[in-house]
Image: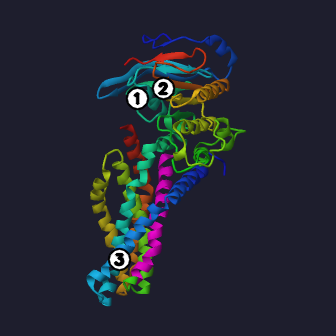
Amino acid sequence: MDSPHRYWENGTDRDSEANRMVSPPPVLFEARALLFLRQDEPVFGPLDFHLDRGEILLVEGDNGSGKTTLLRVIAGLLRADGGSMHLDGQILDHDSAQGRLLLLAHQLGLKGDLSPLENLRVAVGLHGCREHITPRDALRNVGLQGYENEPVRQLSAGQKKRAALARLLLLPAELWLLDEPFANLDREGIALVNRVIERHAEEGGAALVTSHGAVTFLHGQPRRLRLAS
Amino acid sequence: MRPGSLRAACAAILRRDLLLAWRRRGDIALPVLYALIVTTLFPFALGPDTALLARVAGGVVLVTVLLAMLLAFDALFRQDLEDGSLEQLMLAPQPLALMLGMKILAHWLSTALPLIIVAPVLASMLHLPGEAIAVLVLALLLATPLLSLLGAVLVALTAGTRRSGMLLALMLLPLCVPVVIFAAGAVSAAQTGLPWIAPVAWLAAALALMLVLAPLACAAALRIAIDA
């Protein structure tokens, strides 16, 4: 990247990564001079960064530095005020790219009166499902066996988070946008998130993970994108 | 039905919202109870004059049913906004307007349909003649979805604001008026033996128009509400 704004620093050996992925093209997502304003004040940006297939990018910044806003802009819930986003080298068109992006937000999007299984079935009905996995498998994988039919409202915060993580396992999306995926989770849950993200990267997906800077529980040395407040 | 197809998505949303409504059956019972109480009170207030009751019956039942529907409107999108499922709906690879249309359909099925089922009972309590009851049910079958669609657009427009209930009622009032005029016109025409098909056709035409436009307007309004 020969952009004047180098918000990220290189942490992984990207050459070996690129060699492993011959086709399709390694760059999955790219943001060029991406800018978002609120009342004429920049919330973040202009930002230049890219994300290869099989890569995890850690988005760091203090509270209020625009991490969540960045994810919502990429997801298409907010409109960027400048710059452009590209998916597979094409300008990102949210109407046709829906389903390739998956957002795990603070509000998990689970219905409290429905069970985790019923919630997942709705998600599968909307998005479709990966091969060789059922909602029941996904719940077992995140350690919610025995809670399949409990109303989500009665689960603990960590268990709700796990139910939302099960959606990541099920739905066929390439680019994951994970907003503080480690919040509310115990040690085992943190290991689970790491496992889930790593497997997604091994299968050629990519993930943007936010963290408020103090600690990150991500394994290895992921590339970092630092948002200034 | 392949998961992720349009039909599967429509079925998933419809099924989810009906299931949620069923889990909160008490909320469904409230509008029905309200309609029952109001129509029961009318004969006490007006006196036991059968001819008078029969003359006002159509209007009373119509207005009561439409007002009872108002009670349930506020909840149409609020929960989805709060728990983040609306965001997930927007990120799904399905046309948002169609999914919202399914939500409105589920809302109509769970709030208006029980009211339409009890409407003949309420009307006969007020001595409305049999043939007029049939027209009343027909008018309600067209007027209530129309009101659901109009209401959904307004709920979507006021979704971001606090205490939107009052604003919603004020905005919905002028839109209710033509619906009430045509529906009550059909019932009173049937009661006096006049042809009633014209006002019913007007309701049907308005319903056809709103069936297409209201979900699109809802989708646009909710995208703005999410943006805020």
Mark 3 residue type: Thr
Residue located beneath label 2 in the image: A85
Residue contact at pointers 2 and 1, CB within 8 angstroms? yes
Q: CA distance from mark 2 to mark 1?
A: 9 Å
Segment colored magenta: B95-124
**Residue B22 falls within the magenta-colored stretch:** no
Q: Please name the residue shown 44% across and 79% down the image.
A: B120
Which amino acid lies under the numbered mark 1 shown in the image of this protein? Ala
The percent position of residue B211, horizontal first and vertical second, equals 44, 59
Do marks 3 and 1 both belong to one polypeptide chain?
no
Report which quarter residue B139 is drawn in.
bottom left
Q: Earlier in the sequence, mark 2 or mark 1?
A: 1
Q: Residues within 10 Å of mark 3 (few under 14, many from 20)?
A: many
* Mark 3, secondary structure of its residue: helix
- A51 left or right of A170? left
Q: Which SS class for mark 1?
A: loop
Q: Position of residue A194 (x, y in %)?
A: 61, 25
Can residue A190 be seen here? The reply is yes
Whether the magenta-drawn stretch holds residue B104 is answered as: yes
Q: Label 3 vs label 2: CA separation?
A: 59 Å
Mark 3 vs mark 1, CA separation in Å: 54 Å
Q: How crowded is the residue under tag 1: few (<14 C-alpha within 10 Å), some, or many (20+)?
A: some
Q: Nearer the viewer, residue A27 or B172?
A: B172
Of residues A65 and A219, the one nearer the viewer is: A219
Dominant secondary structure of the magenta stretch? Answer: helix
Of the numbered discs in the image, which one, if any, rests on residue B39? 3
SS for dot 2: strand
Looking at the picture, tell me which residue is in the foreground, A135 or B160.
A135
Tell me the residue that label 1 is attached to.
Answer: A80
Residue A36 is situated, as x and y percent measured from the top left of the image, at: 38, 26
Q: Residues within 10 Å of mark 2 (few under 14, many from 20)?
A: many
Residue A90 shown left or right of residue A212 in the figure: right
